[in-house]
Image (tube, rainbow, N blue to C red):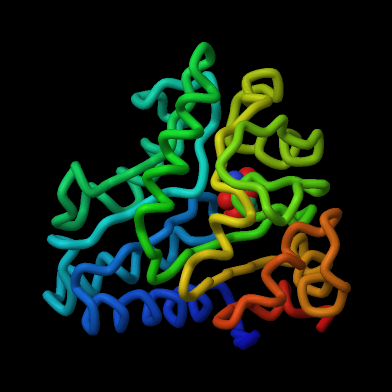
Protein backbone atom coordinates (compact mmCIF):
# COMPACT_ATOMS: atom_id res chain seq x y z
CA UNK A 1 0.00 0.00 0.00
CA UNK A 2 1.33 3.39 -0.96
CA UNK A 3 0.06 6.26 1.21
CA UNK A 4 0.40 9.80 -0.07
CA UNK A 5 -0.32 12.47 2.53
CA UNK A 6 -1.35 15.81 1.08
CA UNK A 7 -1.85 19.25 2.57
CA UNK A 8 -5.43 19.68 1.48
CA UNK A 9 -8.26 18.67 -0.87
CA UNK A 10 -6.77 20.51 -3.86
CA UNK A 11 -3.44 18.77 -3.59
CA UNK A 12 -5.16 15.39 -3.13
CA UNK A 13 -7.26 16.06 -6.24
CA UNK A 14 -4.27 17.07 -8.39
CA UNK A 15 -2.17 14.08 -7.39
CA UNK A 16 -5.14 11.74 -7.91
CA UNK A 17 -5.87 13.25 -11.31
CA UNK A 18 -2.23 12.88 -12.33
CA UNK A 19 -2.47 9.13 -11.80
CA UNK A 20 -5.39 8.99 -14.26
CA UNK A 21 -3.80 11.45 -16.69
CA UNK A 22 -0.54 9.50 -16.92
CA UNK A 23 -2.51 6.26 -17.36
CA UNK A 24 -4.49 7.73 -20.28
CA UNK A 25 -1.30 9.08 -21.89
CA UNK A 26 0.27 5.65 -21.62
CA UNK A 27 -2.91 3.74 -22.51
CA UNK A 28 -5.53 5.75 -24.43
CA UNK A 29 -7.98 2.81 -24.39
CA UNK A 30 -7.83 2.28 -20.64
CA UNK A 31 -10.74 0.85 -18.66
CA UNK A 32 -11.60 3.04 -15.68
CA UNK A 33 -13.67 2.18 -12.65
CA UNK A 34 -15.17 5.43 -11.39
CA UNK A 35 -16.70 6.66 -8.16
CA UNK A 36 -19.18 9.33 -7.12
CA UNK A 37 -19.36 11.35 -3.90
CA UNK A 38 -17.85 14.71 -3.03
CA UNK A 39 -14.33 13.33 -2.76
CA UNK A 40 -13.47 12.68 -6.46
CA UNK A 41 -15.07 15.90 -7.80
CA UNK A 42 -11.73 17.77 -7.70
CA UNK A 43 -9.98 14.86 -9.41
CA UNK A 44 -12.54 14.99 -12.24
CA UNK A 45 -12.05 18.78 -12.57
CA UNK A 46 -8.31 18.32 -13.02
CA UNK A 47 -8.85 15.53 -15.53
CA UNK A 48 -11.14 17.86 -17.54
CA UNK A 49 -8.42 20.54 -17.50
CA UNK A 50 -5.94 18.02 -18.93
CA UNK A 51 -8.50 17.10 -21.60
CA UNK A 52 -9.02 20.78 -22.49
CA UNK A 53 -5.25 21.17 -22.75
CA UNK A 54 -5.29 18.27 -25.23
CA UNK A 55 -3.04 16.17 -23.00
CA UNK A 56 -5.54 13.30 -22.99
CA UNK A 57 -8.62 12.04 -24.81
CA UNK A 58 -11.49 9.81 -23.70
CA UNK A 59 -12.26 8.73 -27.28
CA UNK A 60 -11.29 5.11 -26.62
CA UNK A 61 -11.79 5.00 -22.86
CA UNK A 62 -14.40 2.78 -21.24
CA UNK A 63 -15.80 3.60 -17.82
CA UNK A 64 -17.70 1.56 -15.26
CA UNK A 65 -19.22 3.16 -12.21
CA UNK A 66 -19.23 1.53 -8.83
CA UNK A 67 -22.78 2.04 -7.75
CA UNK A 68 -26.19 3.66 -8.14
CA UNK A 69 -29.20 4.25 -5.94
CA UNK A 70 -32.21 2.03 -6.52
CA UNK A 71 -35.62 3.53 -7.22
CA UNK A 72 -34.23 6.68 -8.84
CA UNK A 73 -34.55 7.24 -12.56
CA UNK A 74 -31.55 8.04 -14.76
CA UNK A 75 -32.68 11.64 -15.33
CA UNK A 76 -33.23 12.36 -11.62
CA UNK A 77 -30.67 14.91 -10.43
CA UNK A 78 -29.92 12.68 -7.43
CA UNK A 79 -28.86 9.76 -9.63
CA UNK A 80 -25.19 8.88 -9.85
CA UNK A 81 -25.68 8.71 -13.63
CA UNK A 82 -26.59 12.41 -13.57
CA UNK A 83 -23.67 13.13 -11.24
CA UNK A 84 -21.17 11.54 -13.60
CA UNK A 85 -22.53 13.48 -16.60
CA UNK A 86 -22.33 16.72 -14.64
CA UNK A 87 -18.91 16.14 -13.13
CA UNK A 88 -17.07 14.49 -16.01
CA UNK A 89 -18.74 12.92 -19.03
CA UNK A 90 -20.38 16.07 -20.42
CA UNK A 91 -16.99 17.77 -20.66
CA UNK A 92 -14.87 15.13 -22.40
CA UNK A 93 -15.05 13.21 -25.69
CA UNK A 94 -16.15 9.89 -24.21
CA UNK A 95 -18.55 7.84 -26.36
CA UNK A 96 -21.96 7.38 -24.70
CA UNK A 97 -21.75 3.67 -25.51
CA UNK A 98 -18.53 3.39 -23.47
CA UNK A 99 -20.15 4.77 -20.31
CA UNK A 100 -21.50 2.20 -17.89
CA UNK A 101 -23.35 3.11 -14.71
CA UNK A 102 -25.22 0.26 -13.02
CA UNK A 103 -28.99 0.42 -12.84
CA UNK A 104 -31.32 -1.93 -10.98
CA UNK A 105 -35.01 -2.00 -11.77
CA UNK A 106 -37.12 -2.96 -8.75
CA UNK A 107 -38.77 -5.89 -10.50
CA UNK A 108 -35.57 -7.20 -12.13
CA UNK A 109 -32.93 -6.72 -9.45
CA UNK A 110 -31.35 -10.16 -9.77
CA UNK A 111 -31.21 -9.98 -13.56
CA UNK A 112 -29.81 -6.43 -13.56
CA UNK A 113 -27.06 -7.31 -11.05
CA UNK A 114 -26.12 -10.40 -13.05
CA UNK A 115 -25.96 -8.38 -16.26
CA UNK A 116 -23.70 -5.67 -14.81
CA UNK A 117 -21.53 -8.24 -13.11
CA UNK A 118 -21.07 -10.18 -16.33
CA UNK A 119 -20.15 -6.98 -18.17
CA UNK A 120 -17.52 -5.91 -15.62
CA UNK A 121 -16.06 -9.40 -15.44
CA UNK A 122 -15.44 -9.24 -19.20
CA UNK A 123 -13.04 -6.34 -18.63
CA UNK A 124 -9.76 -5.82 -16.87
CA UNK A 125 -9.96 -2.50 -15.07
CA UNK A 126 -6.72 -0.56 -15.31
CA UNK A 127 -7.72 1.50 -12.32
CA UNK A 128 -10.57 1.74 -9.85
CA UNK A 129 -11.14 5.14 -8.26
CA UNK A 130 -12.59 4.90 -4.76
CA UNK A 131 -13.83 7.18 -2.04
CA UNK A 132 -14.57 5.81 1.39
CA UNK A 133 -17.58 6.05 3.66
CA UNK A 134 -17.26 7.31 7.24
CA UNK A 135 -18.05 3.74 8.27
CA UNK A 136 -15.41 2.33 5.92
CA UNK A 137 -17.74 1.36 3.08
CA UNK A 138 -16.27 1.14 -0.41
CA UNK A 139 -18.71 1.57 -3.28
CA UNK A 140 -21.80 0.74 -1.24
CA UNK A 141 -20.28 -2.34 0.39
CA UNK A 142 -21.37 -1.74 3.95
CA UNK A 143 -19.81 -3.31 7.07
CA UNK A 144 -20.55 -7.04 7.11
CA UNK A 145 -20.27 -7.55 3.34
CA UNK A 146 -18.26 -10.71 2.51
CA UNK A 147 -14.96 -10.08 0.72
CA UNK A 148 -15.97 -12.46 -2.10
CA UNK A 149 -19.15 -10.47 -2.85
CA UNK A 150 -19.84 -9.55 -6.48
CA UNK A 151 -22.40 -7.02 -7.81
CA UNK A 152 -25.52 -6.97 -5.63
CA UNK A 153 -28.29 -4.83 -4.24
CA UNK A 154 -27.56 -3.63 -0.74
CA UNK A 155 -29.72 -2.27 2.06
CA UNK A 156 -27.89 0.92 2.96
CA UNK A 157 -26.66 1.29 6.53
CA UNK A 158 -28.55 3.80 8.67
CA UNK A 159 -25.32 5.80 9.02
CA UNK A 160 -24.91 5.99 5.24
CA UNK A 161 -28.50 7.20 4.79
CA UNK A 162 -27.94 9.91 7.41
CA UNK A 163 -24.59 10.96 5.89
CA UNK A 164 -25.96 11.07 2.34
CA UNK A 165 -29.08 12.98 3.39
CA UNK A 166 -26.99 16.17 3.06
CA UNK A 167 -27.62 15.98 -0.68
CA UNK A 168 -31.42 15.64 -0.31
CA UNK A 169 -34.14 17.97 0.99
CA UNK A 170 -35.36 15.46 3.54
CA UNK A 171 -33.89 12.25 4.94
CA UNK A 172 -37.05 10.38 3.82
CA UNK A 173 -36.04 11.07 0.21
CA UNK A 174 -32.74 9.17 0.51
CA UNK A 175 -33.05 5.76 -1.18
CA UNK A 176 -32.61 2.86 1.20
CA UNK A 177 -31.18 0.49 -1.39
CA UNK A 178 -28.42 0.66 -3.98
CA UNK A 179 -26.80 -1.54 -6.61
CA UNK A 180 -23.05 -1.78 -6.14
CA UNK A 181 -20.06 -3.64 -7.49
CA UNK A 182 -18.99 -6.08 -4.79
CA UNK A 183 -15.74 -6.11 -2.85
CA UNK A 184 -14.41 -8.89 -5.08
CA UNK A 185 -15.08 -6.84 -8.26
CA UNK A 186 -13.33 -3.81 -6.77
CA UNK A 187 -10.28 -5.83 -5.83
CA UNK A 188 -9.99 -7.22 -9.37
CA UNK A 189 -8.76 -3.84 -10.68
CA UNK A 190 -5.06 -3.66 -11.54
CA UNK A 191 -4.66 -0.47 -9.50
CA UNK A 192 -6.89 0.95 -6.79
CA UNK A 193 -6.78 4.68 -6.18
CA UNK A 194 -8.51 5.57 -2.93
CA UNK A 195 -9.02 9.22 -2.05
CA UNK A 196 -10.01 10.52 1.38
CA UNK A 197 -10.57 14.02 2.62
CA UNK A 198 -11.70 15.47 5.94
CA UNK A 199 -11.70 14.44 9.61
CA UNK A 200 -14.83 12.30 9.19
CA UNK A 201 -12.66 9.85 7.20
CA UNK A 202 -9.71 9.74 9.63
CA UNK A 203 -10.87 6.66 11.57
CA UNK A 204 -11.75 4.76 8.37
CA UNK A 205 -8.25 5.49 7.03
CA UNK A 206 -6.60 4.53 10.30
CA UNK A 207 -8.48 1.20 10.21
CA UNK A 208 -7.57 0.64 6.57
CA UNK A 209 -3.90 0.80 7.52
CA UNK A 210 -3.94 -0.79 10.97
CA UNK A 211 -6.82 -3.25 11.39
CA UNK A 212 -6.54 -6.93 10.56
CA UNK A 213 -8.70 -7.61 7.47
CA UNK A 214 -12.26 -8.23 8.67
CA UNK A 215 -15.66 -7.88 7.05
CA UNK A 216 -16.89 -5.31 9.58
CA UNK A 217 -14.35 -2.92 8.02
CA UNK A 218 -14.88 -3.28 4.25
CA UNK A 219 -11.87 -1.07 3.50
CA UNK A 220 -9.53 -3.67 5.07
CA UNK A 221 -10.29 -5.94 2.10
CA UNK A 222 -7.97 -3.68 0.11
CA UNK A 223 -4.93 -4.34 2.30
CA UNK A 224 -3.83 -7.35 0.30
CA UNK A 225 -4.18 -5.64 -3.06
CA UNK A 226 -0.83 -5.50 -4.83
CA UNK A 227 -1.28 -1.97 -6.12
CA UNK A 228 -3.26 0.20 -3.72
CA UNK A 229 -2.59 3.94 -3.71
CA UNK A 230 -4.20 5.91 -0.88
CA UNK A 231 -4.21 9.69 -1.22
CA UNK A 232 -5.34 11.59 1.87
CA UNK A 233 -5.47 15.19 2.89
CA UNK A 234 -4.06 16.25 6.26
CA UNK A 235 -7.35 15.74 8.10
CA UNK A 236 -8.06 12.28 6.73
CA UNK A 237 -4.52 11.13 7.60
CA UNK A 238 -4.54 12.82 11.03
CA UNK A 239 -4.73 9.52 12.98
CA UNK A 240 -1.93 7.80 11.04
C1 LIG B 1 -21.13 7.27 -1.03
C2 LIG B 1 -20.68 6.42 -2.24
C3 LIG B 1 -19.26 5.99 -2.12
C4 LIG B 1 -18.44 7.17 -1.64
C5 LIG B 1 -18.81 7.49 -0.22
C6 LIG B 1 -18.16 8.73 0.32
O1 LIG B 1 -22.21 6.80 -0.33
N1 LIG B 1 -21.46 5.29 -2.55
O2 LIG B 1 -18.80 5.49 -3.37
O3 LIG B 1 -17.09 6.84 -1.69
O4 LIG B 1 -20.20 7.49 -0.01
O5 LIG B 1 -18.74 9.91 -0.17
P1 LIG B 1 -18.07 11.32 -0.10
O6 LIG B 1 -16.93 11.31 -1.04
O7 LIG B 1 -19.14 12.28 -0.49
O8 LIG B 1 -17.60 11.50 1.31
Q: Quadrant of the C terminus?
A: bottom right
Q: Is residue 25 left or right of residue 137?
A: left
Please, is residue 97 above or below residue 186 in the view? above
Q: Quadrant of the N terminus?
A: bottom right
In the image, 160 versus 235, the foreground residue is 160
Provide residue 16's location: percent of width, then percent of height.
46, 76
- Is 238 situated left or right of 225 in this image? right
The answer to whether residue 189 is above or below residue 77 is below
Looking at the image, residue 172 lies above or below residue 165: above
Q: Residue at x 35, y 51 (%)?
A: 87
How far across and down, in percent of the image, does residue 33 sit?
A: 42, 59
Q: Residue at x 70, y 24 (%)?
A: 171
Residue at image location 19% in from the left, 57% down from the top: 92
Q: Position of residue 164 (x, y in %)?
A: 66, 39
Question: Which of 233/74 is in front?
Answer: 74
Q: Position of residue 53 (x, y in %)?
A: 15, 76
Amino acid sequence: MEIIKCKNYDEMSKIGANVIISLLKRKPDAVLGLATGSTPIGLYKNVIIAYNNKEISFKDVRTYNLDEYCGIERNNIQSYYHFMNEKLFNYVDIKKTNINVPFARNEFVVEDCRKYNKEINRRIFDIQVLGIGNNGHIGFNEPGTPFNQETFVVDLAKETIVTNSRFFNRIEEVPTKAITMGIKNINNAKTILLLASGTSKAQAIYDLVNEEPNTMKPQTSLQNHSNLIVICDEEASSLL
